[in-house]
Amino acid sequence: MASGMHQGPDLGRFEESAHALASAARPVCAYVYDLAHLRRQAEYARRSLPPGSRLLYAVKANAEAAVLQALVPVVDGFEVASGGEIERVRKASADAPIAFGGPGKTEAELARALEQGVEVVHVESVNELARLEEAGRRQRRRVEVLLRVNLSEGLPGATLTMGGPTQFGIEEAQLPAAVDLARQCRWASLRGFHFHLLSNQLDPLAHAGLVARYLDHSLAWASEHGIPLSMINAGGGFGVDYAHPGRQFDVALFAGRLEAELANRPGARGVTLVFECGRFLAASAGAYVVEVIDLKVNHGRHFAIVRGGTHHFRLPASWGHSHPFRVVALDERRPGSSRPEFHDCLLTVAGQLCSPKDVLARDVAVERVRVGDVLVFDHAGAYGWSISHHDFLSHPHPDVVLLDDPE
C-alpha cells in the first residue's frame, strides 16, 4: 500500500483554458481534460491497492479516445459494457486486457468479444453463459468467466445501488444452476465471481467491509461447489464527493483496512482481486467550461443562462444535485455586446434547452457574475459527456481541449 498524500488537479489549468477559449468568436463551451492529472490519479489508485490487485478503468465513465490512450500504460486493463466500448479500447490498444460486463449482451457482441481477445466475461445469467459457450464453440476460442452475483442484504449507503431487486447479475438462489452449467462448459472457463453492487461510496472503511464480504461469499461458494477460485472482481464504487470537491475517497485508508481483512482470510492467498474504477479516476481530470450568455431575474430568482446545459453535462440532473462551479471573470468583452451583471446573489445556472430540468446548479452564492464570464464546473471528467443526450435540440457539441505535461 502506498503512503503519502495524493495531489489533486491543478485547477488553474482549467481557468487558463477558459481564457484561451475566450479568444474565439463563438461563446465558450468546452470539456477540458487534464491527461497528466488523469495518469497521476490512476497511478495513485493502482499503487495504493493491496499487493497483487489489478486496476481496470471502467470505460463507461469517459470513453474519449485521448483518455483511453492516456490510461493504457497506467492501468491493468479496461472494463467495458458493450461491443462499441470493446472497439474503442481496441483502437487505443491492440492487446490491453478487457473485461466485458453488463446486462443484455447480444450474440453479436459475445462473438465480437471473443474475436477481439477479451480476457474475461462477467456473465449476468445462466442463459448468457449458455450463449457464451455456444459462441466459443463456433469460434473454437476459450474465454475466462466470472459469474456476476447479485446480493441484496446489508448493503452500505451509496448514490446508486445495483444489488437486490434489479436487473443485474444472478441471485444467490440461482448460483448452483449457473455453476452446474459452467462445469459442463468446454469453452467458457469459470474462474470466480464478480460483484458490483453500488456506486459512489464515500466511506472507505465501509467499502473495505463490503469487499471483505465479497471475499467471504466467494470463498464459501468455491468450497461448497468445488470451484478452483482464482479471481474476484469487486467492481468499482470509489466515490467522488461533488458537494465538497476538495475531498475524495481515501484509497489508502480503504486499502489498509482491506489488507487487514485479507490477512485474516488465508484462503484468499493467490486469488487476484480486481477493481474496475471509472468515476474516481476520471472525474477530477475534467472540467465543463461554459460562457454566461444571459442573466435574468424571474419571480425573485436569479438565473444565469449558459452556452450548453444538461445535453452536454447530464450528471447534475441525473443525480439531482447542484454541481459546484467557479466564476472566471473574463475581460475579453465580446464586440458590440452588453454586460449585465449580478452582485451578491443566489444564482441558478440553466442551459439552452426548452426544459425546466435543464439546470446545472441551484441557488449558489456568488459575489459577482457578468454576461461573458465563464463558469468552470470541476469534477466533470466522468459521467458528464458520456451519459448526455448530445443532440437534443441540435445544439453544437462542446469543444474538447486536452491538456498534458510536456514530455
Image (cartoon, rainbow, N blue to C red):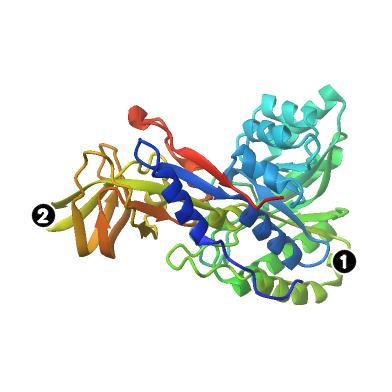
Percent from the top left, x then y, of residue 172? 67, 54
Residue drawn 43% across the image and 50% down it: 18
Q: Nearer the viewer, residue 248 or 158?
A: 248
In the rendered structure, find residue 213 and report the number of the disc placed on it.
none
Percent from the top left, x then y, of residue 246? 50, 69
Categorize mark 2 by other alpha carbons within 10 Å: few (<14), some (14-19), many (20+): few
Is residue 224 found left or right of 79 in the rendered image? right
**Against 84, is 6 above or below?**
below
Percent from the top left, x then y, of residue 58? 64, 48
Residue 394 in view of the camera: yes
In the rendered structure, find residue 299 and report the number of the disc placed on it.
2
Judged by depth in the image, the label closer to the viewer, 2 or 1, is 2
Mark 1: amino acid? Arg
Q: Which mark is first along the chain, 1 or 2?
A: 1
Residue 101 in view of the camera: no
Percent from the top left, x then y, of residue 366? 28, 64
The kind of secondary structure element at disc 2 is loop
The kind of secondary structure element at disc 1 is loop
Q: In which quarter of the image is residue 352?
A: top left
Return the residue at label 1.
269
Quadrant housing the N terminus: bottom right
**Against 362, is 137 above or below?**
above
What is the C-alpha distance between the residues marked 2 and 1?
Answer: 64 Å
Residue drawn 71% across the image and 36% down it: 92
Q: Nearer the viewer, residue 103 or 53?
A: 53
Single out the residue that lies furthest toward the left.
299
Is residue 317 found left or right of 103 in the rendered image? left
Q: Quadrant of residue 277?
A: bottom right
Residue drawn 74% across the image and 52% down it: 75
Categorize mark 1 by other alpha carbons within 10 Å: few (<14), some (14-19), many (20+): few
Q: Which of 89 and 201 is in front in this view?
A: 89
Mark 2: amino acid? His
